[in-house]
Amino acid sequence: MIRLKNIKKSFGKQMVLKGIDLTVEKGEVVVILGPSGSGKTTLLRCINFLERADSGAITIGDLSVDCHRATKKEILALRRKTAMVFQHYNLFKHKTVLENVMEGLVVVQKWPVERAKERSLQILEKVGLSQQIDMYPSQLSGGQQQRVGIARALALNPEVILFDEPTSALDPELVGEVLSVIQKIAREGITMIVVTHEMGFARDISDHVVFMDNGVVVEEGKPNEIFHAPKEERTKQFLKRITPEWRYSI
Amino acid sequence: MNIDFRFIVTAFFEIMKALPLTLVITTVPLLIGFAIGIGTALIRLYKVKVIYKIADFYVSFLRGTPLILHIYIVYLGLPLLFDVLAEKWGWSIRSNSIPLIVFVFVAFSLNAGAYMSEIIRSGILAVNKGEIEAAYSIGMTTSQAMKRIVLPQALMISLPNLCNMFVGLLHGSSLAFSISLMELNGKANVVASTNWKFLESFIAAAVIYWGMTILAEKVTAILEKRLRMFIKGGVA
């Protein structure tokens, strides 16, 4: 289980997160929605300390960390319980697909190479990249690269995978293959926190939806409630603009 | 004025005998300087307490003064320092038993280290920040990320500049003659002085330097071609 308590974060004078509380149950898929600049990516990056929150507390499983006072060791322990899929994939460019996926297992989790290779191959098969294991990231399409990113995260068997707009940098034609892989692993009961702009996808995959705006959680609930019967005016406004019901009269 | 072409050929083979020494006083400082360069670059990037000031000074001073002065200062200063230390620690040897080549190694290594630290530093800064974040996100420590992700790529990016460094140092090594080390330039002077055919002798030496430089460029081109696969293409 993951619990965020009163997470606050400012960049200079601008307060980006104004006290966020969030609970994610084991196996749950939580989707965070919100307009650009609402702080959703920052929130995600605070969870694995790519950004250090100014205050608040983060609990993942049996590990609780005070954001302000967190030591290097605590941050490392926290990062080893999480994995992240990035908007721009951020694959290790000098390593092959297989090496990208093995890297964490071998270097961080100290698996023997043979075993790490075996597991990585299994996972690459799951994301449909068995044919590409010896290629370098620059030889792959965006969709393939992102699936490597997902495999790299998945290989570590983390308590939670954080997805930071995983399809925002992709050609529209390649979005589908990535979303279907994410959906597939969501069904396997892996805890996920997903920041996305893909509304249809969000509705299909989520167990819980959080709508953020301007550094606060405006509304959260079951996807049905949020998408079909939002209570807050701001949520209604956002959903309307994002999923417009065009009516043409000729 | 006549040029004795046949003597150019004679001198060429005579001067070639000094090529091994030139290569030694080029490659050894290049390797030592490389280690110094990585260390200095990391110290300056991470702003390691106190010593980063020393590193800043080192790079600024060495890059701000000519190589010939580094040779002179080391040649004249190192014996003093050595004798003081020898006395203090009770070593049995004194500075007059230090071979000449050691001064050259020290001066060239310090010089190369300062330049290479800047090359490597810019290489490190050119590595995609996102990959460093990815390394952290899978739980790597700072040093693991540096060793496994950043440095390999930084060095690939730096490779063309490091090869230039080799060429610069190769040519710079001709200054070792100023403390009478018999490398290519020294040998050219000696060969010429036997019959006062300086021009022929220097032309021969120039051809040797040029040939080595072309060789270095060829090797660089091959390496670069192999590495282009990673650096070019791909996203972000």
Image (cartoon, coloured by chain):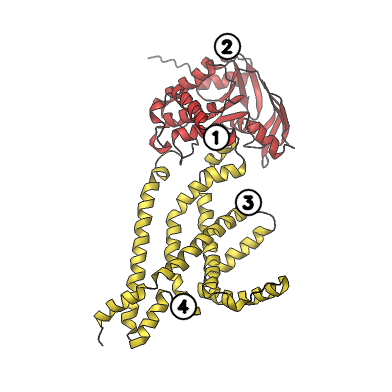
Chain colours: A red, B yellow
Q: Residues within 10 Å of mark 2 (few under 14, many from 20)?
A: some
Earlier in the chain: of badge 1 and badge 2, it is 1
Indicate left or right for B125 with B182 as reference: right
Which numbered disc covers residue A224?
2
Q: Along the line of sight, which residue is nearer the eye, B104 or A155?
A: B104
Q: How many labels, in total? A: 4
Circle nearer the viewer, 1 or 2? 1
The verdict on a common chain for dots 3 and 1 is no
Q: Kindly indicate whether the residue at mark 4 contacts the one at mark 1 (C-beta within 8 angstroms).
A: no
Which numbered disc covers residue B154?
none
Q: Regarding mark 3 in the picture, which secondary structure is present there? A: loop
Q: Residues within 10 Å of mark 1 (few under 14, many from 20)?
A: some
Q: Is residue B21 visible?
A: yes
Circle nearer the viewer, 2 or 3? 3
* Image location of residue A153, percent across then percent down: 54, 29
Query: Subunit of mark 1?
Result: A
The amino acid type, in three-letter code, at marker 1 is Val
Q: Regarding mark 1 in the picture, which secondary structure is present there? A: helix
The verdict on a common chain for dots 4 and 3 is yes
Name the residue carrying label 1. A106
